[in-house]
Image (cartoon, rainbow, N blue to C red):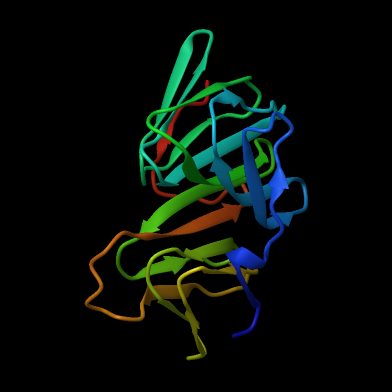
Amino acid sequence: MKGVSVQRVGDIPAEPWKNGGGLTRTLARGKNFWRVSLASIDQDGQYSRFPDTTRLSVILRGAGVILRRPGAVVELPPLIPAVYDGDAIWDACLVEGPCVALNVMARTDAHRISAVPIDGPIAVPPDTVGVVLADHASLRLHDSEGATLDLHPGQFAVLAPCASARGIAFADPCYAGPPSFLVWVASLDKTFPTLTDHTP
C-alpha cells in the first residue's frame, strides 16, 4: 500500500526518561513538532514541560494515572483518550502500579491531534497523518485503489497524508476484545471527534 510504513513496536529503541521514571519508544514524528510514542510509566514523578504544546494520552495497560498541578487535576483512566496542556508541569501519580501509555504531542499553533479506539470499521481522513497501533488483534487497512495491508499485534503503521480516505477494520470481523487505537495528526482546519480536553 502506497504511503504506509510498518514496524514492530519491539524494534523501536527505548529511551529512558530524565527522571528515571519510565521509558519512551517514539513511533512517529513530523515537522513543526509532533510526536507519537509509547511510554512505560514505572513510578510516580514529574512530567517534562513542553511550551506551546498540546498533549494527549491513552492508558493502554494498567489502572491509570492521575496528573496534578496547582489548580488542576487530570485523570487518565484506561482506554479513554484525554487532552491536556503540555506547557504545564504535571506531577504524575500511578493509580495502582506501572502503566503503558500511548502519548501524542504537537505544537498547539500548528496541529490538531486526536486518538480514537478502533472497535469497528473506521477511516483515516484525507490529508491527515495516521498512526495505527495494532495492540491486541490483527487489523486490515485498505485504500481507494483496492490495496490492502494486514497489521498484526505488536505492529504499528504510519500513514502519510494522501488525497483520499483510507479504511481500517479488524481482520477477524468477529473479534470482540480490547480496542486498538488510531492517532490522527492534521492541520488546524481539520475537525475530529470531541475528546475530553483539559487545556485551559
Q: Which sits in the foreground, 99 or 187?
A: 99
Give the image quarter of residue 63. top left
Which residue occupies 30% across, 81% down?
A: 172
Horizontal and vertical percent for residue 118?
37, 62
Q: Is residue 161 left or right of residue 30?
A: left
Horizontal and vertical percent for residue 6?
61, 75
Q: Which sits in the foreground, 185 or 45?
A: 45
Q: Is residue 149 left or right of residue 88?
A: left
Which residue occupies 30% across, 67% down?
A: 120
Which residue occupies 54% across, 51% down?
A: 190
- Up the image or down, 109 lies above or below 199; here it is below
- Up the image or down, 30 lies above or below 10; here it is above
Horizontal and vertical percent for residue 58?
45, 44
Give the image quarter of residue 168. bottom left
Horizontal and vertical percent for residue 142?
47, 82
Q: Residue furthest right?
A: 31
Q: Is residue 179 left or right of residue 154?
A: left
Which residue occupies 70% across, 37% down?
A: 17
Q: Residue furthest bottom?
A: 146
Q: Which sits in the foreground, 14 or 5?
A: 14
Picture quarter with the N terminus: bottom right
